[in-house]
Image: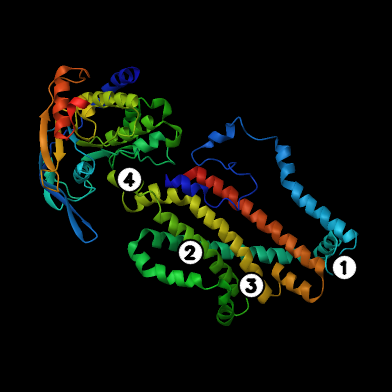
Amino acid sequence: MSLLQTSRRSSAGYADVPAAALPLHFRGVGRAFTDRDQQRQVLQDVDLTVEAGSVVALLGPSGCGKSTLLRAAAGLDTPTSGTVVIGDRPVRGIDDRCAIAFQEPRLLPWRTVRANVALGLPDGTARSEGARLVDELLGLVGLAEHADHRPREISGGMAQRTSLARALARRPGVLLLDEPFGALDALTRMKMQDLLLAVHEASPTTVLLVTHDVDEALQLADRVVVLGRPAGGTAATVSHVVDVPGERPRDRGSVDLARLRGELLESLGVDAHRH
Amino acid sequence: MSDAGLAVVGHGASDGTVAGGRPDPAGGRRRTDPARPAHPVLLLLARIVLPAALLLAWYAATRAGVFSPVQLPSPGSVLDAGRGLVGRGELLTHVHISTQRVLVGFLVGSTIGVALGALVGLSRVADLVLAPTIGALRAVPSLAWVPLLILWLKIGEDSKITLIAIGAMFPVFTTTYLALRHVDAQLVEAARAFGLRGVRLLTTVQLPAVVPAVFSGLRLALAQSWLFLVAAELIASSQGLGFLLIDSQNNGRTDRLLLAIVLLAVLGKLSDAALGVVERWAVRRWA
């Protein structure tokens, strides 16, 4: 795959300055929303550790609070109980040790691709150093030739790569991905998954990935965590954890993965034999 | 995306560049569009055909004697009236003082409008405290201020410029305020997630997002300024195009009256076109 090759070639520089991968811990995290005077508990007692440098995928039915958990790690949302800890410091408000890529690219339409990526640079980055890193990241995600285009002039996949590069520009200790490939077509999605693996290989930061795609989770993650509501409960919590064997990139057709796929689908309440 | 929505607002008042002819805020891609319509000369012809036809109809009507010269003087006599006034050195004075009043009033009013719109649009507290009062003031037909302004500021430049500023302020306030309220919340959140706050968030996300809307407000405000200029000059003045209108009416000089109307049309169009140039520059620069 040419995109991947380009990425690999240019990734050496990006890896020169290793981002310090940080562990991410959720300790008894709960979140309730108030909805027309009704308390609605969405998450309860979520205990989860994402080890430094590992990739963890969060799976779960829609509306179960996957994104809420991710937003709590980014400091965009505050849990009603429990704490989120990155490294050895709890998350209080927006945290510059993480970077996030959303399901939508959320690029500034009036800025070029390059300027959008530069938005992710941490405060106090020297101008020349920042420009060098942005150029490197643009090469890494295969957008060097489109650096001066505006977001509306590039495809959805390119926009998502821009969004990923913007997150990487932060050199995050924890990279948070909220269904970043969910809105892409199947082929582009696979390319993006390979790209993410290449990026992770070049600079192995901690990654927490929210997805609703079992195959994507098995392809990318060291560990797959399923969020679900216990029988009779309304709030979701960790219901199933699967450690995925094998080095990445993994063979999409392997028997082991097929077995895990069945197990995960079952934990999501889907009859694996019909799919 | 909301920005795209905002970019389309308020181009009804733009110069005649035809729908879609406006440069895309994203960059000049459309300039090289192979489907570009017709030759520039044809476009120019398309734009002047209606004014030429109106002029011709006017000429024909007066020539055929459909109306008396007091009801509708001929184009030639309007031109003569203009020459006469220029010769006596009056016309330039009228044009000069009117243009000056509009520009000063527009600048003062729109500056206050942008500032107030930004404050109320960005701050929840300001919205709570100020919005109802401003809404009530906006509901007062602006001409209702005239007697009070004359009482307070006397019949001079101050009262006229204040009236024009009031007229210019509200469209700018309303568009700025609403546009800021509707800036894409997802974009703002993304920018916040990347550490942008306060002034930097404002200049990086919110202001660029509202530039097109603010300019449509400014263009409305400019039209309002001319409206309130004439109102102010009709009521109490000794100079300016509004004075020329009322003075000509009192003296039965329909030719001068028509001259003043034509001049208001030309000046209004020219000032709007000039603002359009600034708008295109600003949209290219920021949005």
Q: Chain of mark 3?
A: B
Mark 1 or 4, nearer chain start: 1
Q: Amino acid at mark 1?
A: Ser
Q: Amino acid at mark 4?
A: Ala
Badges 4 and 3: C-beta atoms under 8 Å apart? no
Mark 2 or 1, nearer chain start: 1
Q: How many marks do you count on the picture?
A: 4
Q: Is residue B161 visible?
A: yes
Q: How is the image coloured?
A: rainbow
Q: CA distance from mark 3 to mark 1?
A: 30 Å
Asked if badge 1 and badge 4 are on a common chain, one would say: yes
The spot of residue B263 in percent (x, y) is: 73, 60
Q: Amino acid at mark 2?
A: Ile
Residue sitting at x 39%, y 34%: A114
* Disc marking residue B112: 2
* Disc marking residue B232: 3
> Extreme right residue here?
B64
The spot of residue A82 in percent (x, y) is: 10, 49
Badge 4 crowding class, 10 Å Cα cut-off, few under 14, some 14 to 19, many 20 or more, is: many
Which residue does the numbered mark 1 point to in the structure image? B68
Badges 2 and 1: C-beta atoms under 8 Å apart? no
- Camera-side mark, 1 or 4: 1
Q: Chain of mark 1?
A: B
Q: Is residue A54 visible?
A: no
Q: CA distance from mark 2 to mark 3?
A: 20 Å
Which residue does the numbered mark 4 point to in the structure image? B191
- Camera-side mark, 2 or 1: 1
